[in-house]
Amino acid sequence: MNAKPETSDEPSVVGVRVRPAWSIALYALLVLSAGVAFYAQRTPGIDPMVARIAPWIFLVFALGFSTYRIALVAARRYSPFKAFIQMFLAALFFLLLLFPRVEGPLDANPLLAHRDDRVRAQAAELAGWRGDQTQGAGLVKLLADPAPAVRTAAHDALVKLNGGVDLGQSADAWGKRFP
């Protein structure tokens, strides 16, 4: 029988010898956990607890992967530069996962509710020029604004968003068009 003699420089992690199958399995788990964590962070409707836990699960696999790479470098079987870059990218991805995901509607324009009537009027005018249909509901609310300049800007913007068709000054008619 051709049995390979064991060498002392064979990489091991916590006394367990590292084999090529381990590297493939660890790498696959790392990529899979990264994909699941990214999906959980960026997909609306996911349970918030799952979204909070997902980056930390990725970190567990990234630490296992890093430990494996360090063992290979210590046994002089892997490039230290490549190992460092891979560990750096895993850490960077983990830090990116820590950013909170955006909650709530993205179409809300906080400037339409600003305390200064000039800012509200300019925000309404800009929404009309941009043709941003998602701002319609916010503009309808501005039709009842106490400042006449804001009401006029909101009405003009709604007409632009409606393709030039004027439904009048009634907030009810505009509310049906932009719910």
Image (cartoon, grey):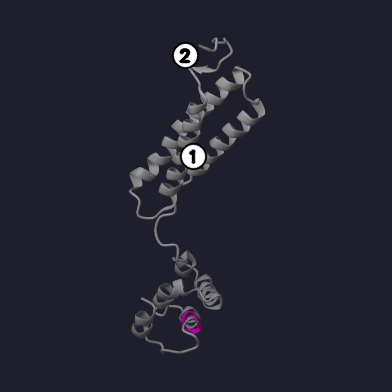
Task: Verify whether residue 155 appears in magenta.
Answer: yes
Could you say where residue 133 lies in the image, as x and y percent from the top left? 46, 75
**Farthest residue in the front direction?**
1
Could you tell me which secondary element the residue under label 1 belongs to? helix
- Residue 84, by quadrant, is top right
Among the two numbered marks 2 and 1 on one chain, the one whose residue lies closer to the N terminus: 2
Q: Amino acid at mark 2?
A: Gly
Could you say where residue 15 lies in the image, as x and y percent from the top left? 47, 14
Could you tell me which secondary element the residue under label 2 belongs to? loop
- Residue 60, by quadrant, is top left
Kindly identify which numbered label has been placed on residue 15: 2
Task: Verify whether residue 151 appears in magenta.
Answer: no
Query: Looking at the image, which residue is at 33% across and 83% down?
Result: 172
Front residue of 126/26: it is 26
Tell me which segment is drawn in magenta: 154-160
Kindly identify which numbered label has been placed on residue 103: none
Kindly identify which numbered label has been placed on residue 31: 1
Query: Looking at the image, which residue is at 62% across and 33% down?
Result: 85
